[in-house]
Amino acid sequence: MTLARRTASLSAAGFVASTLIAVPAAGDAVQVRYRTQAIDNIEIFYREAGPPNAPTVLLLHGFPTSSHMFRDLIPRLAQRYHVVAPDYPGYGFSSAPSPTAFSYTFDHLADIMERFTQAIGLRRYALYMQDFGGPVGFRMAVQHPERISALIVQNANAYEEGLSPAMDAARPAWEQRTPETEKTLRGFLTLDTTRFQYLHGVRDPSRISPDAWLHAQAGLDRPGNDEIQLALLHDYGSNPKQYPLWQAYLREHRPPTLVVWGKNDPFFTVAGARAYERDVPDSEIHLLETGHFALEEDAPTIAGLILDFLDRKLVAR
């Protein structure tokens, strides 16, 4: 399906038209471009902005959103950096083949994202990871550590103590896919749960645009998308098994690491944020008084922390 046809389909499904419009901060003059790159038979949609010869920041989104979650961050970072934010297969405006035609596992998503970076000419980049972006990004970093200039970790877990008790209900599904465990996971696909993910723990709910959770929910509600999400939610159990490998990568390579963490996240704990210091002792950790999708409330603050961090760390290297 072409991007134009897919856009029309998403609009009909309830996607907000402003999804395709950059939302720069006041005074910004950054032009965000919307592109696609074919990887095999999969069209990967991505947002791109900033000077192409500047250091690159690769933004990896979480569940159940897409590169849309970076709409307020991209124009701020692109003043000084080359910024790329792709949608995974099954998310946003990327192709969404059925699970019978495409294997929806975190290994496969990481492979597609790695090939995507090579296809568009990214040889080295700072990696921003949120939620699902963690398991995708850490697999990429372990496979090619030489390509990672820095890590920016925003509520992306790599430690067992980072999994809150709220995740316990999903653990049986990580071990076995049955009608009962599938029923549990379907609870993550409802509008009430999506809205909860965006609003829980924020300081001021009136600052959280409903565009965010309605955009995410429109993607979940597309015909057949539930099967895509269930496949990945079941495969999430592959991630804790890789935590020791990811931690070994951190200890061995000591990438410059910035942790910006919504400390009221119902899924990933503050202990998981602080754990990064164990393996990268000079990590810079900032706990923000907000929730899982911290950018919705604190994009200006997070952008400022990232710019300061990258300006110091990338120049130092």
Image (cartoon, rainbow, N blue to C red):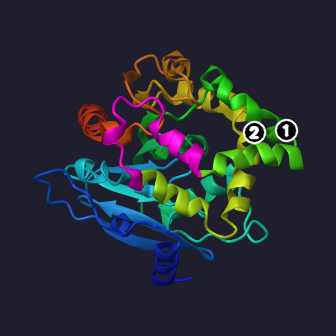
Residue 193 in magenta stretch:
yes
Residue at the spot 62% in from the left edge and 32% down from the top edge: 246
Across and down, in percent, residue 94 comes to 53, 68
Is label 2 in a helix, a strand or a loop?
helix
Dot 1 alpha-carbon crowd within 10 angstroms: few under 14, some 14 to 19, many 20 or more:
some
In the rendered structure, which segment of residues is drawn in magenta? 191-211
241 and 131: which one is in front?
131
In the rendered structure, which amino acid carries the disc numbered 2?
Gly
* Picture quadrant where residue 162 is located: top right
Q: Quadrant of the N terminus?
A: bottom right
When the figure is inspected, residue 152 is found, relative to residue 284, above or below; the finding is below
Is label 1 in a helix, a strand or a loop?
helix
Residue at the spot 76% in from the left edge and 46% down from the top edge: 234
For marks 2 and 1, give the CA distance. 7 Å
Magenta stretch secondary structure, dominant: helix
Across and down, in percent, residue 9 comes to 52, 78
Query: Is 128 placed left or right of 72 in the picture?
Result: right
In the rendered structure, which amino acid carries the disc numbered 1?
Glu
Q: Is residue 60 visible?
A: yes
Q: Quadrant of the C terminus?
A: top left
- Tally of numbered tags: 2
Question: In the rendered image, which residue does mark 1 sit on?
Answer: 175
Numbered circle sitting on residue 237: 2
Across and down, in percent, residue 97 comes to 67, 71
Across and down, in percent, residue 273 comes to 50, 23
Dot 2 alpha-carbon crowd within 10 angstroms: few under 14, some 14 to 19, many 20 or more:
some
* Picture quadrant where residue 152 is located: top left
